[in-house]
């Protein structure tokens, strides 16, 4: 399917010469934190109601292999103003954080729809002695998710947190073996997280 771009982008693409560049924007999103927004430019810009800070960075070509590995691309950012490094320290590298790569044109920043948008996640992180942040970005790896997603067990509770909101036990006991027998002994079998009515050991959906 051909890539849909705006009429403004088509006009700019077909110019023989232009003094206005295409801008590469990066948005890095960590949990419960304001997004980090940088642009490959010599000055800050405002796009989509947000400030994008000028930063030197390099985005390599997307790497693919015949071994069915997750496609990846290397991103290097010179973090002079230390906008990224503190988040890497806080989130132990930030592996799994979401990264949006967008392309816009400098003459059409009023267009809030990027000409290209790709969502990836951080797969690996390194920082060298010159404070260059090197990120390996990749597509979501579906092999990290269990399939089928749910597991039904007859005599074992699926709730991870004892006395949590799902468990609901409020007594004096401090430990639980997460079995039906233990839950019944505590008088909490109504909230048991297993499926005693199943025949056999369990069933995967």
Image (cartoon, rainbow, N blue to C red):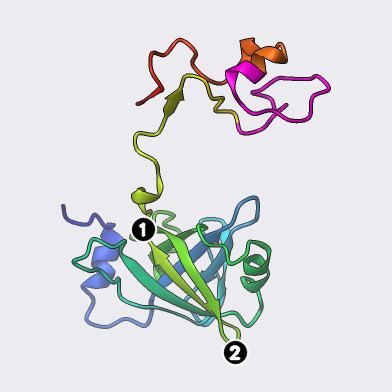
Q: Is residue 18 above or below residue 50?
A: below
Disc 1 designates what residue?
139
The answer to which image quadrant residue 152 occupies is: top left
The outermost residue toward the left is 1
- Marks counted in the figure total 2
Does the magenta portion include 172? yes
Disc 2 designates what residue?
130
The outermost residue toward the right is 172
Say which element carries label 2.
loop
Q: CA distance from mark 2 to mark 1?
A: 28 Å
Q: Is residue 165 above or below residue 160?
A: above
Name the quarter where the C terminus is drawn: top left
Q: Which stretch appears magenta?
A: 160-182
Question: Crowding at label 2, few (<14), some or many (≥20) Cα neighbours within 10 Å?
Answer: few
Q: Which mark is residue 170?
A: none
Query: Could you tell me what secondary structure mostly forms the magenta stretch?
Result: loop
> Can you give x and y, in whole percent of width and height, for residue 99 in the image?
47, 60
Q: Is residue 188 visible?
A: no
Front residue of 175 and 110: 175
Question: Crowding at label 1, few (<14), some or many (≥20) Cα neighbours within 10 Å?
Answer: some
- Looking at the image, which residue is at 61% across and 71% down? 84
Does the magenta portion include 3? no
- Looking at the image, which residue is at 47% across and 63% down? 122
Q: Is residue 45 visible?
A: yes
The answer to which image quadrant residue 190 occupies is: top right
First in sequence, mark 2 or 1: give its number: 2
Say which element carries label 1.
loop
Q: Is residue 56 above or below residue 13?
A: below
> Can you give x and y, in whole percent of width and height, for residue 157 in the image?
56, 25
């Amino acid at each position: 399917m051909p890539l849909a771009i705006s009429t403004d982008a088509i006009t700019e693409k077909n110019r023989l010469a232009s003094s206005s560049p295409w801008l590469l924007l990066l948005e890095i999103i960590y949990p419960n934190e304001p997004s980090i927004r940088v642009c490959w430019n010599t000055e800050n810009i405002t796009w989509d109601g947000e400030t994008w800070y000028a930063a030197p960075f390099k985005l390599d070509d997307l790497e693919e292999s015949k071994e069915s590995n997750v496609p990846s691309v290397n991103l290097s950012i010179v973090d002079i103003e230390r906008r990224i490094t503190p988040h890497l320290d806080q989130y132990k590298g930030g592996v799994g954080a979401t990264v949006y790569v967008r392309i816009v044109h400098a003459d059409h920043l009023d267009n809030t729809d990027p000409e290209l948008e790709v969502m990836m996640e951080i797969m690996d992180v390194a920082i060298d002695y010159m404070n260059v942040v090197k990120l390996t970005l990749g597509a979501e790896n579906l092999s990290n998710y269990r399939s089928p997603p749910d597991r039904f067990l007859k005599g074992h509770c699926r709730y991870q947190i004892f006395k949590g909101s799902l468990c609901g036990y409020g007594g004096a006991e401090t430990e639980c073996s997460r079995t039906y027998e233990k839950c019944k002994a505590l008088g909490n079998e109504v909230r048991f997280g297993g499926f005693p009515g199943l025949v056999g050991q369990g069933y995967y959906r």
